[in-house]
Amino acid sequence: DTGVSQDPRHKITKRGQNVTFRCDPISEHNRLYWYRQTLGQGPEFLTYFQNEAQLEKSRLLSDRFSAERPKGSFSTLEIQRTEQGDSAMYLCASSLVGRYNEQFFGPGTRLTVL
Amino acid sequence: RKEVEQDPGPFNVPEGATVAFNCTYSNSASQSFFWYRQDCRKEPKLLMSVYSSGNEDGRFTAQLNRASQYISLLIRDSKLSDSATYLCVVTTGNTGKLIFGQGTTLQVKP
């Protein structure tokens, strides 16, 4: 257990529904990252926060996706009008500021869109 | 072309074997380099950072060649517990965001 938690661990939904995932980072970590991983691929960066500010978003993050970190602590990732192509593992990671600081990953939320 | 490329394998080796994984990256501005390990259906975990001078951690040795934009990982005396996917990772800029390769799967057999 790295200290990063994610909820839920698994989510099955029907196409067109909205889903929301939560990530609780290690408490003193000011950076929080979201990644998406599909089968047989490495994780791909989606977005990151430094404290409550969302500083970068990947082109992978279409306008159906929104992420928040309202008080600089936990974060949520919402997907609206889910599509089958959204099926993936959504990973959250946290770290301290600094490019050499290790990112600690949560266990992920596995999303299946039927 | 992917920013970080790895041979996906799988590499099937007997216990005790030495196995080497290679990785290339396309962005010459990449600044930090890592190997992560990911067990089946689990989250990635940092295995080791990679430096130009090379670094060793027990049975694991990592090398970086900036001129060739090439990173390697050598595992000596493979154990059954080394079976996992090994992810080559780089960062660029100060955001700390990780750019992953596809991963190389290692299966160590008795």
Image (spheres, rainbow, N blue to C red):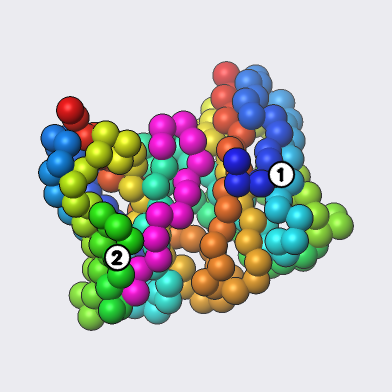
Taking the spot 68% from the left edge, 38% from the top edge, the residue there is: A6
Q: Is residue A5 visible?
A: yes
Label 1, label 2: how many angstroms apart (C-alpha)? 33 Å
* Magenta region: B39-51
B63 or A86, nearer to the observer: B63
The answer to whether A112 is drawn above or below residue A40 in the figure is above
Residue A58 relative to residue B104: left or right: right
Give coordinates of residue B52: x percent, y percent. 30, 78
Quadrant location of the N terminus of chain A? top right
Taking the spot 51% from the left edge, 76% from the top edge, the residue there is: B93
Amino acid type assigned to the residue bearing label 1 in the image: Cys
Taking the spot 60% from the left edge, 74% from the top edge, the residue there is: A98
Q: Is residue A54 visible?
A: no
Kindly indicate the quadrant of the structure image that contains residue A55. Answer: bottom right
Residue closest to the far right: A71
SS under mark 1: strand
- Residue B42 on the magenta span: yes
Give coordinates of residue B68: x percent, y percent. 21, 75
A80 or A98, nearer to the observer: A98
Residue for badge 2: B56
SS under mark 2: strand
Quadrant location of the C terminus of chain A? top right
| Chain of the residue that carries numbered disc 2 in the rendered image | B
Residue for badge 1: A23
Amino acid type assigned to the residue bearing label 2 in the image: Glu
